[in-house]
Image: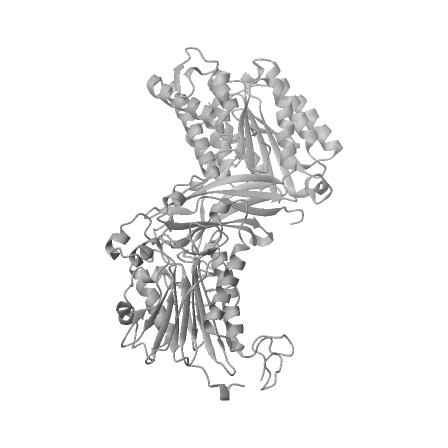
Amino acid sequence: MTGAPDFAVEVYQNEYLSVGATEVNAIVTVTASGAGGPAAAAGPAGSAAEVIIIDTSGSMHVPRTKLSSAKQATAAAIDTLRDGVAFAVIAGTDQAQLVYPYRHGLEVANDQTRAEAKQAVTKLSANGGTAIGRWLHLADSVFATQESSMRHAILLTDGQNMHETPRQLARTIHEVTGHFVCDARGVGTDWEVKELRQVADALLGTVDIVAEPEGLEADFRAMAASAMNKAVADVSLRLWTPQGATIKFVKQVEPTLADLTGRRTDVPPRSGDYPTGSWGSETRDYHVCVQVPAAATGEKMLAGRVSLVLPGPDGSETVVGKGNIVAVWTEDTALSTRINREVAHYTGQAELADAIQEGLEARKAGDVETATAKLGRAVQLATETGHSDTAKLLAKVVDVEDAKTGTVRLKRKVAAVDEMTLDTRSSKTMRVRRKAEPAEPTES
Amino acid sequence: MTCPNCGEPVGAKDRFCESCGANLRVVRTPVGGPLGAAEPGEPCVACGGTHVGADGFCEDCGRAQPAGRDRMESDLGPVAGISDKGRRRARNEDSMAFGTAGGDTPAVVAVVCDGVATSDRADNASQLAVDAASDVLLDAVLEGKDAEDATRAAVAKAVDVVAGLADPSVQRTAPSCTFVSAVVTPGEVTVGWVGDSRAYWLAADGARRLTIDDTVAAELVAEGMSEEAAMAVHQAHALSKWIGADAGDIEPRMLTFTPAGPGLVLLCSDGLWNYLPEPQALVEALPGPPDGVDLQAAASELTHVALELGGHDNITTVLVPFPPKLESAGSQP
């Protein structure tokens, strides 16, 4: 494939373990650079495919601006598709309907087809229920009509998945996993964060809330633009581990938290591949935790080796980049107790996300004690680690008495939008400060 | 005949290679140390598997294979040595260098330096010191100079190169090391030392320690305190003399003697003698009688014993037989 980026792998860890210790933690930073970007737009654009799925259930009429904003947003996304990209638009209710093109399949983007698609979108009306699995199923069969190396979908909904069972949705997600990447967006506050997170996590995309319909257009344009900047799809992270090792977890920790542990495909004899989706020029961080058999003091062991696997034609693959995760056993406690900044940073972020999600869950279930404890811990963590945006979101859900000790009281009335925003944003992470970077961290 | 350094043809009577300038009468360990590296195809030291990767890790069990300074081994025939990282330290900060000089005044020279762990770049310091000192000793014996004068010059040179490493802005961590050397000729043995690396004479009869440590405890013993009481003093093992920018002007202590019969001169760092301080224990740890034992096997066995007893520090062991097993002056080209 031309225009594929170069991948570099860096490992951040404290390699020193105390005698008898077996757990090795490392942050693996993968940087892809030199992806085609705008220049590649002139290249073989036929390899990219985009499907936009827009919810047209009856509730999209309430308020009225919701549907009109969704239409505008879809039009903006269509405008962002570069010439040559294969695309389609699906309208979703309790059924799924292909809005454009007019026959089953994908259409190649150019001035004329983009105009036709936008025209078809303006005619949409809202009526019916919500069955997200059926939408994904149709998207999958539309994608399947063409050989495209990069498949991306945008899914927008405003309601809960009422017209199919959770099992049906889970089965469909399982069926289409690995076929395309999907970013999911909820508009308003009547949708279920858990449901969309399930879709986005499985399909290696992002989940977010767009509280006000007016915000949709900018968000859709950004998602489509980001999809257009991807240069290589179906990239896997390959992890080699030694004999007798157990993989405790493999998580993407930046830009968002995503647990990949269960997504492993074994590559005998001693490796496994974890899906990472499509890549443009970008940087992502992974937290790898491996348990290895302890060795004698002074011994050094390779506890893991990380590389990236790019698919090639006819099932061939290219392995690029290499990062070694090592373990050295020492009796020098000054070495073994040293805290690695990167590992601590992302361990803290994961704990913060867990505290928020578990706290909100408990709050919903009416378990005031657990909710107070968890959200209090979240406030404490957010304050300690300088997550000021998260702290602000938390302050809308709890009254903070003492941020340092995490003493909080649950607010009696919480706006649904505040709670859902806190929930969806909890899995967004902040890049660890590195020496070369500006002093102020930026939320990503 | 060809030059062992560059492979170009040389004359049988040449002292230097006409092509690269190498001294044809000298054989010595490589500058920078006889760095170890796993040979391709060698089985893993931990699991015995045969899939050791190019980066020095076993592809089965992940164990790092000894490499670089972790385990340095060299056997030049008339002298052999092993320097091992041990089991507790992250790095090997010991170094060794040795060589043989042919010609009219054949001799074997050897130097062991133990980098002071609390100093910065201690491994760098000890390696520079052994390389510089052994060159001075080899040049001196080729020119037929007095071994004690040569030893003094070698220490001065070592001080010079190690002091050159110091960063003037961080005085307390100036790179530093100990020093012990041997010059073994067909007639006598000269040892010189600074610090607590030791030389021993190992023989079936009359095995003894040749050096007196430059440590706080050893100085107290010299002043009349009992060994037991001296060892209990705070920082008993602290060096009273060392080589480094912050060591001041130092002179090595020296000893020259003519052994009564054949045996072995052992130079070692405290990683070995901490476990086997008694000369008789060292003799007994050898895989054969001191006279005629295989040098490499003997160094390997002594290292193994220290590792088995804990391997708390870096372990360096260099062995030189007396009389030296050098071809006589007449048969040397």
| Residue B33 placement (x, y as % from top left) | 49, 65
- Let me know if residue B43 appears in the view: no
Q: Residue furthest front?
A: B223
Question: What colour scheme has been applied to the protein in the rendered image?
Answer: one colour
Image quarter of the N terminus of chain B? bottom right
- Above or below residue A169? Residue A11 is below
| Residue A161 placement (x, y as % from top left) | 47, 24
Which residue is at 37% across, 58% downward?
Answer: B214
Left or right side of B44 for A129:
right
Q: Residue furthest top?
A: A412
- Above or below residue B322? Residue A243 is above
- Above or below residue A293? Residue B4 is below
Left or right side of B166 for A51:
right
Image quarter of the C terminus of chain B? bottom right
- Above or below residue A416? Residue B66 is below
**Of residues A171 and B158, which is closer to you in this image?**
B158
**Of residues B308 and A204, which is closer to you in this image?**
B308
Left or right side of A285 for A398:
left
| Residue A106 placement (x, y as % from top left) | 65, 37
Which residue is at 65% across, 37% downward?
Answer: A228
- Let me know if residue A334 appears in the view: yes
Q: Residue furthest bottom?
A: B330
